[in-house]
Image (spheres, grey):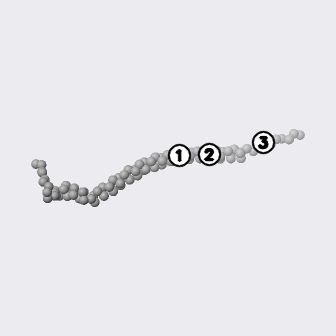
Amino acid sequence: MKKRKKKPNRTGLYLVMTVVLLFCATLGIHSISLRATCSSLQEQKTELEAKKSDLEKEAKSIEEQKKYMQTNEYIEEMAREKFGLVYDDEIVFKAK
């Protein structure tokens, strides 16, 4: 009598392969999503760095203006413009 060859049970193997394929597909989908998020965050970072640079320039300008406003030259200029004050030896010409 001949021995029968047993058919190997492959359902376990197929199940493991299916789980691995599902895992790889899920990982791929999440990878694409994360790359898109990373790209948008990189763009946002670039925009924020540009805004930061602009704000630093503006702060520097304000600081310079603050220093100028504390000088006698500025005080004299404001006295002339706002109050019409002049030195004793100056002559004022007004247009009609």
Left or right of 70 in this view: 23: right
Secondary structure beneath dot 2 equals: helix
- Mark closer to the chain start, 1 or 3: 3
Label 2 sits on residue: 24
Question: Which residue is found at the position 35% from the left and 54% from the top?
Answer: 60
Left or right of 42 in this view: 96: left
Q: Residues within 10 Å of mark 3 (few under 14, many from 20)?
A: few
- Mark closer to the chain start, 2 or 1: 2
Q: Nearer the viewer, residue 19 or 52?
A: 52
Between circles 2 and 3, the one closer to the viewer is 2
Mark-to-mark CA distance, 1 and 3: 46 Å
Residue 35's label in the rendered image is 1
- Mark closer to the chain start, 2 or 3: 3
Question: Which residue is found at the position 14% from the left and 55% from the top?
Answer: 90
Label 3 sits on residue: 7
Secondary structure beneath dot 3 equals: loop
Residue 56, x across and y down, in percent = 38, 53
